[in-house]
Image (cartoon, rainbow, N blue to C red):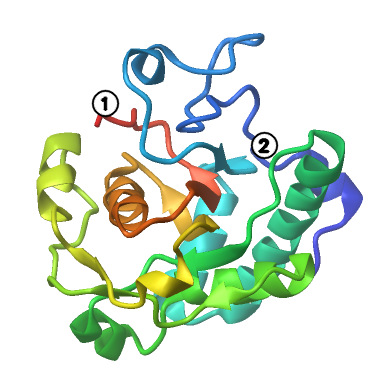
Amino acid sequence: PAIGDACKVDLPWLRHGCRYCALANPAGDSSCRKCQQQLQPFSLVVAPWTYNFPINVLIARFKYRSQWAYGKLLSQVLAEYLQFQLHELNIPRPDCLLAVPLAAKRQRQRGYNQAQMIAQWVGHELDVPVLQHAVKRVRYTNIQQGLSAQQRQHNVRNAFVVGLPEQVQGRHVVVVDDVLTTGATCAALARSLLAAGARRVDVYCLARTSFAVPVV
């Protein structure tokens, strides 16, 4: 499959997102009120789309039905979007990408990690290396879908361990995921990376829901 230029125009592009959480924001404001009160542990979130039709359907088919062609297609458009951000808007170029790791049990159940696949596709297009084993998810967590923001934060607390800190120390690391909802998972991972010596942590994802990111 491919997305033609005419169809791209009709996609639910995220306009005027907060730079720290990507929540829709009034034009001219770089950050939302929550992130002005207290910054997130990541320095920048880049998400091209809101989690609405047809992006939500394509992501679901990729994530839950193994229809990888949709994931690759969306990842390639994400990479194009990032190329524009890097060259025209001068966002900082990362040293490496890191997919949000799945717990071993969920990895076995699903058979693949969709975030890892997105990271590989985007990393290839941007010529940025992808870390493979630097971080482990050491605690099996409940599925985040359906949980409140507070429940999500509690669910992922102490869920990640940086097993190879030498791979992230002093480096600008970008966490890659499919959808950002409350940001609790990415925030927990970012805190672990910063504690292990990462210089900066950003987030790249395909889509952003309208669910507000909690102050962390």
Judged from the image, the secondary structure of the residue bearing numbered disc 2 is: loop
Residue at 65% over, 78% down: 69
Q: Is residue 136 above or below residue 174?
A: below
Tell me the crowding category of disc 2: few under 14, some 14 to 19, or many 20 or more residues within 10 angstroms, Cα based: some
Q: Locate residue 170, reporting x and y percent.
A: 50, 57
Q: Is residue 87 above or below residue 197?
A: above
Q: Locate residue 10, reporting x and y percent.
A: 75, 39
Q: Quadrant of the C terminus?
A: top left
Seen in the image, is 38 located left or right of residue 117? left
Q: Locate residue 115, reporting x and y percent.
A: 47, 69
Report if the CB atoms under discs 2 and 1 are less than 8 Å apart. no
Q: Quadrant of residue 50?
A: top right
Q: Quadrant of residue 142?
A: bottom left
Tell me the crowding category of disc 1: few under 14, some 14 to 19, or many 20 or more residues within 10 angstroms, Cα based: some
Q: Measure the C-alpha gap from mark 2 to mark 1.
A: 25 Å
Q: Is residue 47 visible?
A: yes
Q: Locate residue 116, reporting x and y percent.
A: 49, 75
Residue at 36% over, 77% down: 164
Q: Amino acid at mark 1?
A: Val
Mark 2 or mark 1: name the one nearer the start of the chain.
2
Q: Nearer the viewer, residue 80 or 9?
A: 80
Q: Quadrant of residue 140?
A: bottom left
**Residue tagged 1:** 215
Q: Is residue 1 visible?
A: no
Q: Amino acid at mark 2?
A: Trp
Seen in the image, is 213 located left or right of residue 119? left
Mark in front: 2 vs 1:
1
Q: Nearer the viewer, residue 164 or 186?
A: 164
Q: Which mark is residue 25?
A: none
**Residue tagged 2:** 13
Q: Quadrant of the N terminus?
A: bottom right
